[in-house]
Amino acid sequence: MTAHFQFLMILGAVILLLIIFVLLKKGKMTVKYSLLWLGLAVVLVIFAICPYVVYVLRDLLDVEMPVNLVFMLMFCFVLVVLISLSIAVSQLAEKCKRLTQENALLEKRVRELEKKP
């Protein structure tokens, strides 16, 4: 890995960290969802500072090329993000359904109370 590419990787990871912290500060992202992105940024910094880690992982996982390992790790990261977002959407859909049902019951109750003399 060239020094220029290593510098760009570190810069990219630091920019990612700054973006996450700004989103957290402005309340655009919760801590719960930022943890995955913070983890990714930390891993990118480790890979940039110590590229030897990629080679060690490649040997441990018996992957032929380091690039394949990085693509595999990124694919796994995307899957984890998709699963966590699917869980969040499912929970929100359930809450929305429950709130709609509660709202309908309250409206019915109000109508019944308004009809009473």
Image (spheres, rainbow, N blue to C red):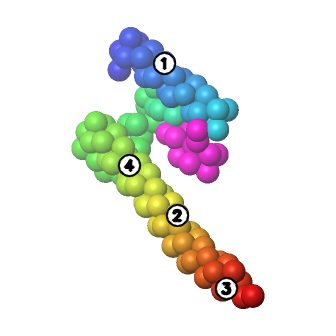
- Depth check, mark 2 against mark 3: the one in front is 3
- The three-letter amino acid code for the residue at tag 4 is Val
Q: Which quadrant is the C terminus positioned in?
A: bottom right
Res 80 visible: no
Kindly indicate whether the residue at mark 1 contacts the one at mark 3 (C-beta within 8 angstroms): no
Residue at the left extreme, as displayed: 64
Residue 92: which disc?
Answer: 2
Q: CA distance from mark 4 to mark 3?
A: 55 Å
- The three-letter amino acid code for the residue at tag 3 is Lys
Q: Which residue is mark 3?
A: 115
> In the depicted view, which residue is nearer to us: 50 or 43?
43
- Left or right relative to 8: residue 33: right
- Depth check, mark 3 against mark 1: the one in front is 3
Residues shaded magenta: 28-40
Instruction: Decide whether the magenta segment is chiefly helix, strand or loop.
Output: helix
Q: Which residue is mark 1?
A: 11
Instruction: Give the mark nearer the N terminus: 2 vs 1.
Output: 1
Residue 24: which disc?
Answer: none
